[in-house]
Amino acid sequence: MMKKFLIGGALAAVSAAVFAQYPTRPVTIIVPFTAGGPTDKVARDLAEALRKPLGGTIIIENVGGAGGTLGAAKVAKAAPDGYTLLLHHIGMATSPALYRSLPYKTMEDFEYLGLVNEVPMTLIGRPTLPANNYAELVKWLESNKGKVNLANAGLGAASHLCGLLLQSTMKSDMTTVPYKGTAPAMNDILGGQVDIMCDQTTNTSGQIEAGKVKAFAVTTTQRLTTPALSKLPTLDESGLKGFNVTIWHGLYAPKGTPAAVLEKVNASLRTALKDADFVKRQEALGAVVVTDSRVGSAEHKKFVQAEIDKWTPVIKAAGQYAD
Ligand code: ASP
């Protein structure tokens, strides 16, 4: 018994020493959506800012599909050694209500490493859409009932959540076109194959600024200050009283990742979130970097639980499920 204990203790000491060197090889951050989309952009900017404090190479792997749940499942099942992390958004908190069953347990299968940023969304349309403002859009939607396509990144994506709320508050029924991320959806908006989309400013601000898409409103209750977006009205002031969707991103590791690794990643994240270039880049895209206690593991986890409690009744009332 004593011998076993000593061997176990020695092994623990060896593995603690191994993890104290972390990282000794590239760290992969899984993005559960396609490359070039809003979450991918946040992940790549964050990887840049994390590289120095973490002290190693960071690889972004895009695992899109099923509104972010495939990528999250891959991380939940990955080896808990710190070499596979997940950058995910509000879908962590909305998927439990949207899916009857998920291939992972949101509150149990992950280590919570800290919140990264908050991102407003925008309602945009194809450049050839005849409406030029929200009031004209409402009229156009009415006269095109049954013919309007709404793009999203699948059930569980932020674009799905926003589109779902939009349809239920506007009392409008559109045909949903799901993609593996809003990067390919944006291509089809630009090409005129789909009509409208509600998407994160990290994906839309550049296209709005360049005048390549029609932009109708922002989803926050306050107008945004980002120059490219400051002229846009809120949906709330446009007539959808109380409409308010802001999404957020957080960093996760598989459950059971050693404490030494979690501490190193969290300390590196705290440094990255203060990186002036990262902050400036996020602000230019309309995102706000988190500076409060939610960069800590316990507060991040508490926040996700609070978001699940907040969105579950809203989603159930809007009435949409997947299997
Ligand atoms: N964040 C997703 C993406 O990167 C889109 C979404 O959530 O709607 O494509």
Image: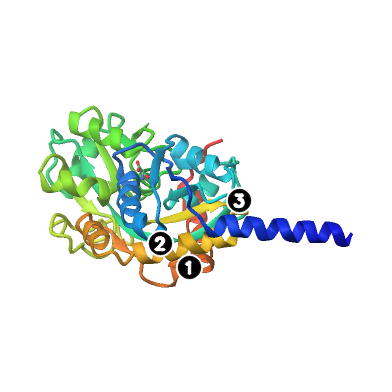
User: Which circle marks residue 296 in the picture?
Assistant: 1
Picture quadrant where residue 247 is located: bottom left
Q: Quadrant of the N terminus?
A: bottom right
Pointer 2 residue: 269
- Which one is closest to the eye, mark 3 or mark 2? 2
Type of residue at label 1?
Answer: Gly
Picture quadrant where residue 104 is located: top right
Q: Earlier in the sequence, mark 3 or mark 2?
A: 3
Q: Is residue 130 left or right of residue 115?
A: left
Pointer 3 residue: 109
Quadrant of the displayed image that contains ligand 1: top left
* Residue at mark 1 to residue at mark 2: CA–CA distance: 10 Å
Residue 121 on image: x %, y %: 29, 52
Colour scheme of the picture: rainbow
Type of residue at label 2?
Answer: Leu
Q: Is residue 85 left or right of residue 143?
A: right
Kindly identify the residue that appears in the image at 49 percent across and 60 percent down.
113
Kindly identify the residue that appears in the image at 53 percent across and 44 percent down.
75
Badge 2 density bin: few <14, some 14–19, many ≥20, Cα 10 Å: many
Determine whether 146 is above or below 108 in the image. Answer: above
